[in-house]
Image: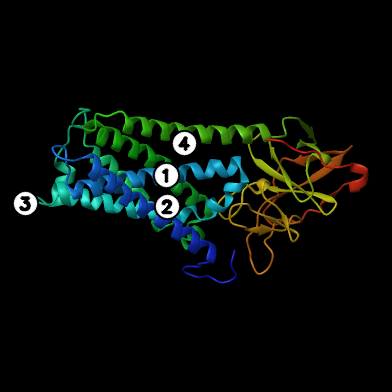
Amino acid sequence: MSVGYRAVQWSAHKRVYDTIACGAAALYVLGFVAVGKFLWRSPHQVSDEILIMRALGSCAIVLFHVILCIGPLARLDPRFLPVLYNRRHLGVLTFLIALAHASIAVGYYHGFGVVNPALSLLTSSTRVSSIEAFPFEWLGLCALIIMFFMAATSHDFWLRNLSSRSWKRLHMLVYVAYALLVGHVALGALQTDRGMLAPALMACGAALVCGLHIAAAEKERRGDVGVQTSIESDETWVDAGPVTGIPANRARNVCTPGGERIAVFRHDGGISAVTNVCAHQGGPLSEGKVIDGCITCPWHGWQYKPGDGCSPPPFTEKIATYQVRVVRGRIEVNAMPLPPGTPIEPAPVASEDSLGAPEVVRA
């Protein structure tokens, strides 16, 4: 969070992150070219243009897998959160590398005829019913267009003006772009490369991405609390477990019968509940903690006061709050959200000594 709007807000950590990311990408491309020149020698020697094109394309694919793995890894292990903070930088870098790959490919294969290179790209093959002659370039082009819009809107300016919900929907297209890229590689490069290494690496990459997402979803499902509910005067109260199950200044994720997720925080001798969705990028607030009296999102550090869901001045963001009560040592949350920014007095709990040490919640 920042008080004033800045087009680009660099920090020492971001400079280090970007330097490492750009350096690693450059080393990969240089290493690929060097190894390629050694392996593909006469009579199987390939031109420098093709070698660079392959290096850039494979680099973009590798970075794309890294980007897709960062999210679930951060959900599985908080030590990956610092990488998540700057994931958008990695996305922009991936787009630029993919754009360089596409530019060389179009120029090399379509730039020497009388037909416009872009038109040649779209019309050189239209046999969509043939696996061998499928226009795989179309898939790569569609993925590149999606990556362009994601890179162009990666700045907080667009996040604020598109609204977090619309921005999130737009950037969920990353999975569509990934599917298109897998098809682009499978119907293109893998059809000319008869070796087993490249298909095996692509299969392992896809399995890794899918496996991590499934593992993160399973962890979240196991952490859901709230299957027990009670209905009183048309109000649904969800059981959020014992008070001692939440360490001080931390939260528990509660799922309502309607599927809404609520972050129930224990802080300053009381219990407060807010929506689990951060107003910034939809980060999971229940995985954050209370810092300086404010709920702090684990993704980018946005903060909200537990008592009313409002960001501390001068910020103006608000999130929904929930009624909460403690009955015989167990927390109950009203499943109906209150309008964002509604003040709710925290439900008091007994002293730390009488409650005993908090239980250790294991994933």
Spatial CA span between label 1 and label 3 = 35 Å
Where is residue 335 shown, x and y percent of the image?
Answer: 72, 40
Spatial CA span between label 2 and label 3 = 35 Å
Question: Pointer 4 and pointer 2: residues touching (CB < 8 Å)?
Answer: no
Question: Pointer 2 and pointer 1: residues touching (CB < 8 Å)?
Answer: yes
Residue 174: image tag: 1
Question: Which residue is at a point 76% across and 56% down the rendered structure image?
Answer: 307
Q: Nearer the viewer, mark 2 or mark 3?
A: 2
Who is closer to the viewer here, 30 or 290? Answer: 30
Q: Name the residue under label 4.
A: 209
Question: Which residue is at a point 74% across and 37% down the rendered structure image?
Answer: 361
Q: Quadrant of the N terminus?
A: bottom right
Question: Which residue is at a point 63% across and 64% down the rendered structure image?
Answer: 316
Amino acid bearing label 3: Val
Near mark 2 (Cα within 10 A), the count class, few <14, some 14-19 or many ≥20, is many
Which of the 4 quarters of the picture holds residue 318? bottom right
Label whose residue precedes the other's in the sequence (4 or 3):
3
Answer whether residue 55 is visible to the viewer in this image: yes
Label whose residue precedes the other's in the sequence (2 or 3):
2
Residue 91: image tag: 2
The answer to whether 218 is drawn above or below residue 352 in the figure is: above
Amino acid bearing label 4: Val
Question: Which residue is at a point 93% across and 43% down the rendered structure image?
Answer: 354
Label whose residue precedes the other's in the sequence (4 or 2):
2
Left or right, 290 with respect to 144, comes to right
Label whose residue precedes the other's in the sequence (1 or 3):
3
Q: Is mark 2 on a helix, strand or loop?
A: helix
